[in-house]
Image: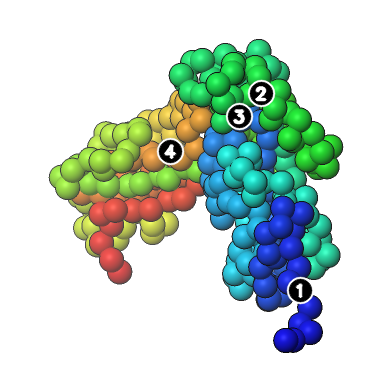
Amino acid sequence: MTNDPAPETYPSGIRKPHAEAPHSKPEVMILTGLSGAGRTRAAAVLADLGWYVVDNLPPQMLANLVTMVGRDSGRKLAAVVDVRGGEFFQDLEAVMDDLEARDVPVTLIFLDASDSTLVSRFEEARRKHPLQEDGTILEGIARERVQLATVRERADNVIDTSTLNVHQLRDRLTLEVAAETPRIHVNVLSFGFKNGIPADADFVADVRFLLNPHWNPELRPLTGLEPAVRDHVLSGDGAQEFLAAYAHVIDVALNRYRANDKSDVTIGVGCTGGKHRSVAMAEALGEALRELGYSVRTTHRDRPMT
């Protein structure tokens, strides 16, 4: 016989896993709340914000996962934990205590909604509440509220999704988590029509009406990135009027895209060969959109390599 101490266990009797100290302390978020309150959508938003998201994770596995993620400095971990875990779920608070004892910062976000809203969502989805058993949806919701009562009290942030659509939930969560207004990422892509229109373009601008540097022997070998070509293109008749008007049209559309949950937009700007006019105008359009507050990446598909 040995006198080895008995292994530590959680309140459920499950043995605590051995976890090494993380190399760095990752930012950890636990996303929980009532079934039907929007956890799936919220998890997708966190993934879009750069979090490493794990869904339906038994809380007891968090310690080892934190250790693993901690090897990648600056990584952020979000775990979706809820009553689907059955008996595993009851250890959530003890797991959080263990992480905080290891100086790992943990944020708990709780999604809530009114009973009537939850019933409506389950009926629309034709799904059974996970705790409904042989009773009604309301009985399942009541059981879940009891199980989650102490977790809700401990939450750093409670978000009531009763009156939020999926777009408003995204905006609210982005504001709470990233402390910023959701941004649209814009890719302005120059191309040549002779090589085909980009398949992923949301907008296509045809700038073949602009002055063509191809017919100027001094400018022909250059590209639209050269100041001489850029000035030649943008000083031509209609160039500045088109740039201002098109930037305004795109701004109007992007604002509506933001309201409809589209976060990435590609704008194709085309001329004949994709070397001069489209490159110069794409650069100018990208700069105009940056001045309007958008995150813009400008690329040139058909510009010859130098």
Precedes in sequence: disc 3 or disc 2: 3
Precedes in sequence: disc 2 or disc 1: 1
Secondary structure, mark 3, is loop
Q: Which mark is residue 141?
A: 2
* Callout 4 touching callout 3 (CB < 8 Å): no
Mark 1 is on which residue type? Ala
Q: Which mark is residue 6?
A: 1
- Snapshot colouring: rainbow
Assign the C terminus to one quadrant of the image.
bottom left
**Picture quarter containing residue 84?**
top right
Precedes in sequence: disc 1 or disc 4: 1
In this view, the mark in front (4 or 3): 3
In this view, the mark in front (3 or 1): 1
Residue name at image x 32 percent, y 47 percent: 190
Residue furthest toward the front? 1
* Callout 3 touching callout 2 (CB < 8 Å): yes
Q: Which mark is residue 243?
A: none
Query: What is the spatial separation of the Cα atoms under label 3 and label 1, in whole angstroms?
Result: 34 Å
Secondary structure, mark 2, is helix
Mark 3 is on which residue type? Leu
Mark 3 Cα shell of 10 Å, populated few (<14), some (14-19), many (≥20): many
Determine if residue 93 is in view: yes
Mark 2 is on which residue type? Ile
Precedes in sequence: disc 2 or disc 4: 2
In this view, the mark in front (1 or 4): 1
Query: What is the spatial separation of the Cα atoms under label 4 and label 3, in whole angstroms?
Result: 41 Å
Left or right, 5 with respect to 128, comes to right
Residue position for label 3: 131
